[in-house]
Image (spheres, grey):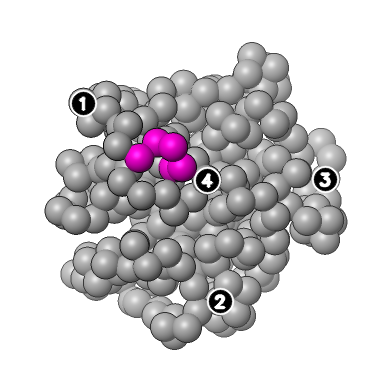
Amino acid sequence: MAYKTERILMCPPDYFSVEQAINPWMAGNEGRLNPAVARRQWEGLRDALTEVVDIELLEAQPGLPDLVFTANAGFVCGARAVPSHFMPHERRPEEAWVKRWFADRGFELCVLPDDIGFEGAGDCLIDRGGPWLWTGYGFRTEIEAHARLAEWFAREIVSVRLVDARFYHIDTCLCPLTGGYLLYFPDAFDAASIDNIEQRVPPERRIVVSADDAANFACNAVNVGGHVFLHDCSSALERELGRLGFEVHRTPLSEFLKSGGSAKCLTLRLTETEL
């Protein structure tokens, strides 16, 4: 097995539940979670990822059911971490625990003012072909955060606006892939954002997903080298990814879809390098 150079943070679903709706996917799923199935699915993703990365664990905490979605803990690049400041007040109790975790592991904390919402690597993604950060706004992250990120990380910020409440973080509808490819669902973005995408990513590197694949969270994928880990996707999308050199690994995560999250939401890459 090749030497593992990547570390990913995950949090076991010890206290994961769906008790109130803070996104459209949760509505109607309150109290319908199967904890045993969620545990098996989370372990399946962890075990699959362990083949290509090292997994670090964030200790689950009682009363913090969404802590399992570590992508929302913050944005990490090099030795710096920007902890999230959640728009839904239900998730704000996670913030102190996550800040302590980052600080205890030696990250330099870049803390946003309390009046600016920002939801970490759910809304800030490093492109794999160009020197920019895809950074969302519209539902959970406020555009006022973008200038701070540009200052802290000396990268161009490409602001993209979400317009469909089902896709409330950009990692639910956009996934930068190795080699500068971009997996995305155009209908989740406004026209100006689509222009931003098309100006930076050439047609041969754009992978447009269907509405059905988007609803299956195909864009909420974890990409490590030539591997793409996701809940599910169509055979057509799998063939297209295969044609481009990617191997798709399906890992069922239906219990987490009830909360509006999938593979990418359950992970935070800790080994992103600075330019």
Distance from disc 1 to disc 4, alpha carbons, whole Å, reads 24 Å
Q: Nearer the viewer, residue 228 or 261?
A: 261
**Number of other residues with Cα within 10 Å of mark 4, as a class: few under 14, some 14 to 19, many 20 or more:** some
Q: Position of residue 207 (x, y in %)?
A: 73, 35
- The earlier-in-sequence mark between 4 and 2 is 4
Q: Nearer the viewer, mark 1 or mark 3?
A: 1
**Which region is colored magenta?**
26-30
**Number of other residues with Cα within 10 Å of mark 1, as a class: few under 14, some 14 to 19, many 20 or more:** few
For disc 3, the marked residue is: 202
Answer yes or no: is residue 136 visible: yes
Q: Position of residue 19 (x, y in %)?
A: 31, 46
- The earlier-in-sequence mark between 3 and 2 is 2
Q: Residue at x 30, y 37 (%)?
A: 31
Q: Residue placed farthest to the top in the image?
A: 235
For disc 1, the marked residue is: 36
Q: Residue at x 68, y 41 (%)?
A: 184
For disc 4, the marked residue is: 24
Q: Nearer the viewer, mark 4 or mark 2?
A: 4
- The earlier-in-sequence mark between 1 and 4 is 4
Q: Residue at x 35, y 40 (%)?
A: 30
Q: Can you say which quadrant of the picture contains the C terminus? A: bottom right
Distance from disc 1 to disc 2, alpha carbons, whole Å, reads 38 Å
For disc 2, the marked residue is: 145
Q: Are marks 1 and 3 in contact (CB under 8 Å)?
A: no
Q: Is residue 235 left or right of residue 141?
A: right
Q: Are marks 4 and 3 in contact (CB under 8 Å)?
A: no
**Number of other residues with Cα within 10 Å of mark 2, as a class: few under 14, some 14 to 19, many 20 or more:** some
Residue 200: which quarter of the image?
A: bottom right
Q: Nearer the viewer, mark 3 or mark 2?
A: 2
**Number of other residues with Cα within 10 Å of mark 3, as a class: few under 14, some 14 to 19, many 20 or more:** few
